[in-house]
Image: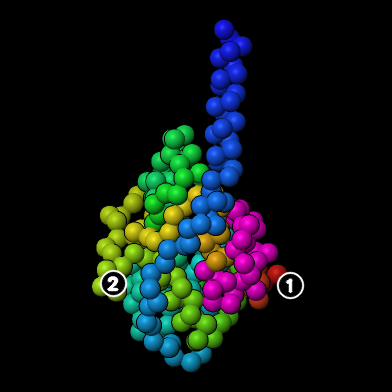
Amino acid sequence: MLRTLWRILRRALLAILAFALFFPPLYNLVVPEHRADSINLPLPPPGSYRVFVADWGYHTSIIVEQPRGWSLGPPGKERAAYLEYSWGDRLFYMESDYQPQAVFATLVLPTSTVVYLDGWTDPPRFRGARSVYERTIDAATTRALLIELERTFRRAAGTRLAPYPPVAGYDGRFYPSYGRYFWIRDCNWWTVTRLSAAGLAGSGAGVLFSGQVSNRLHGFHRVKSDATTHET
């Protein structure tokens, strides 16, 4: 009896493992990433702008210097000097649901997503990040990157949908997002893919962990913890 139950359990576990390994790549091949239509942003004033990539230990975010006079930040921080964008599974990231069934769905099933937006007054320092990478870009590249990031937000009549209510522990706001989340299209893949579209990184294919992101960046240098000097 026990041997029979073990065989049934083993077959069930193998079936679940096979599904977890093969369904996401198949879905990735068949279903293209959903994005908002192209967004019209003006060309920023000529000059140099700073862009950062922060590695928080398990996920990454993109921080962009906002052109003066623009107002892309979240409520109350619309004109922030720097904008932080990141993306992830709605249950795991925004709702902090770490129950086994939620984690399984996050990793294996195409689940709903959110984009996180915060505004900073100063250039990003570590703030608990494991590492931060920086480079300077021109006005045209800044526009291209911000358009690419803004296309993550779900929109109606060209306007972002309203953000979710504030979430404890987060200074920024979460918004409804395009795209489905699972292990082959995770937050770190998103970071590299968005930067790649603006010519700032290589392909996001195969990126799963935050530590892989730095190897795909183009022209970035690692910022030391004082945020004023840099590694050579």
Can residue 140 be seen at all in this image of the molecule?
yes
Residues at badges 2 and 1 in contact (C-beta under 8 Å)? no
The residue that appears at 45% across and 41% down in the rendered structure is 105
| Relative horizontal placement of residue 55, taking residue 95 as reference (left or right) | right
Residue 192 x, y percent position in the rendering: 57, 65
Tell me: residue 139, above or below residue 155: below
192 magenta-colored: no
Q: Which residues are magenta?
A: 194-218
Q: Earlier in the sequence, mark 2 or mark 1?
A: 2
- The residue under label 1 is which amino acid type? Thr
Residue furthest front in the image: 30
Quadrant in which residue 174 is drawn: bottom left
Q: Which residue is mark 1?
A: 232
Badge 1 crowding class, 10 Å Cα cut-off, few under 14, some 14 to 19, many 20 or more, is few
Residue 143 image position (x, y, % from top left): 46, 82
Looking at the rendered image, the disc whose residue lies closer to the viewer, 2 or 1, is 2
**What residue is at 41 percent from the left and 41 percent from the top?**
97
- Judge whether residue 212 is colored magenta: yes
Mark carried by residue 19: none
Q: Quadrant of residue 152?
A: bottom left
Please tell me the numbered disc located at residue 159. 2
